[in-house]
Image (cartoon, rainbow, N blue to C red):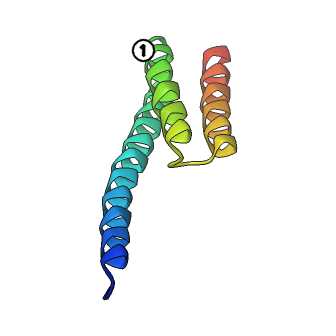
Amino acid sequence: MANHKSEIKRATQNEVRRLRNKTVKTRIKSVVKEIRQAIENNVTEEVSKMLDGAKSAIQKAAKKGVIKKNTASRKISRLTKQLNKAKVQ
């Protein structure tokens, strides 16, 4: 356990940030999962709208530093690629 006043403050800040980051990451995972399930069920019209929301959530997470910029780009790219592949079929 922290002994100094600054250590206690730092530990508290880290815990608050950890919980905030956890909620953002969970949100990203659930949005990505919803889109993938919709693509599997061939609901491509709705998925296009869902993808815009997912892009926004992923980019916000990258901007806040929860995930890295390249990770965000990779997630968006892969989702878009899956959607385009489903539209062709």
Which quarter shows the N terminus? bottom left
Amino acid type assigned to the residue bearing label 1 in the image: Glu
In this view, the residue in front, 6 or 17, is 6
Residue that protrudes farthest toward the front in the picture: 5
- Whether residue 37 is situated above or below residue 13 in the rendered picture: above
Residue at 31% from the left image edge and 59% from the top image edge: 16
Residue at 49% from the left image edge and 33% from the top image edge: 60
Instruction: Report the side of 4 relative to 54 (left or right).
Output: left
Could you say whether the residue bearing mark 1 is in a helix, strand or loop? helix
Name which quarter of the figure residue 43 lies in. top left
Which quarter shows the C terminus? top right
- Whether residue 4 is situated above or below residue 9 in the rendered picture: below
Q: Which residue is mark 1?
A: 46
In this view, the residue in front, 65 or 54, is 65
Q: Position of residue 51 (x, y in %)?
A: 50, 22
Residue at 32% from the left image edge and 69% from the top image edge: 9
